[in-house]
Image (cartoon, helix red, strand yellow):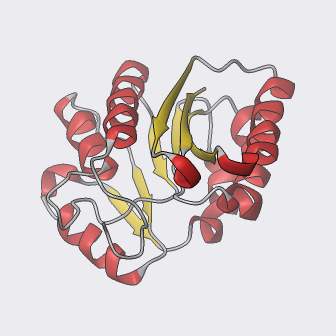
Amino acid sequence: MTVGVGYTPGNMSDLVKHDILKQAVGARGVDAYVEFHSGPGIHPEGYVGSPVQVLRRLRANWNDCPVYLHERNPELRKNLTLAIADPQFHPVTIRGDWRNSVDEYQAQAEEGWFFLIDPTKPQDYENGILHALPWILEKGCGFLAFYPEKIAGRQGRPTFEKLMALIESSGRKVKKHEKVPVGWGKSERVDHILVV
């Protein structure tokens, strides 16, 4: 388990999410790419995370669009900086909490931008993501949203329903919705992976 992240890197949800993400980014030919929760880039267990996988995909397709990666945890952010040190990956900007840059993104974002919204806690949707989604949707930006929903007690269901209602009210369509079952008993959950 990666310290400060709270999950095991390379689990089934990661594999499905990263496959869908690489397809979405590769198919769109993005003009800018933004991750809200980047992690270390390469986990101590050796699993290659989304920032490195996406950068490899973009740069292999000769796409040198700007990339903005966010990681709140200073230790993980330091590891992320090391993971993407290869000059072939740049231009890349690494920042802390994405909420500190939201005004800049809101001013600059346009249809060719793609966001990865991948928190490890559903509470992060209530703590900012649901407030950013309306302008992301309005500007026509693409995004992949990962949402872990606990089954026991239906924890997180109301927030997931808010997320879906925001997308529906924008007139935009969910192009892909994968549901990955994880765990069992009290820790059973469904990881939702949405592409808009």
On-image quarter of the N terminus: bottom left
Residue 142 vs 14, above or below: the answer is above
- Give residue 23's quadrant in the image: top left
Q: Is residue 156 visible?
A: no
Q: Residue at the location (54% across, 56% down)? A: 119
Q: Is residue 85 left or right of residue 138?
A: left
On-image quarter of the C terminus: top right
Q: Position of residue 136 (x, y in %)?
A: 69, 40
Quick one: which residue is furthest to the front in this view?
Answer: 185
Q: Is residue 158 visible?
A: yes
Residue 191 vs 82, above or below: the answer is above
Q: Residue at the location (59% across, 60% down)? A: 121
Q: Position of residue 51 (x, y in %)?
A: 32, 51
Q: Residue at the location (43% across, 31% down)? A: 30
Instruction: Return the residue nearer the eye: 150 or 102.
Output: 150
Q: Residue at the location (79% across, 53% down)? A: 131
Residue 79 vs 36, above or below: the answer is below
Q: Is residue 31 left or right of residue 65?
A: right
Q: Position of residue 177 (x, y in %)?
A: 56, 23
Instruction: Return the residue nearer the eye: 8 or 130.
Output: 8
Q: Is residue 1 left or right of residue 184?
A: left
Residue 95 vs 136, above or below: the answer is below
Quick one: which residue is furthest to the bottom in this view?
Answer: 74
Q: Position of residue 71 (x, y in %)?
A: 44, 69
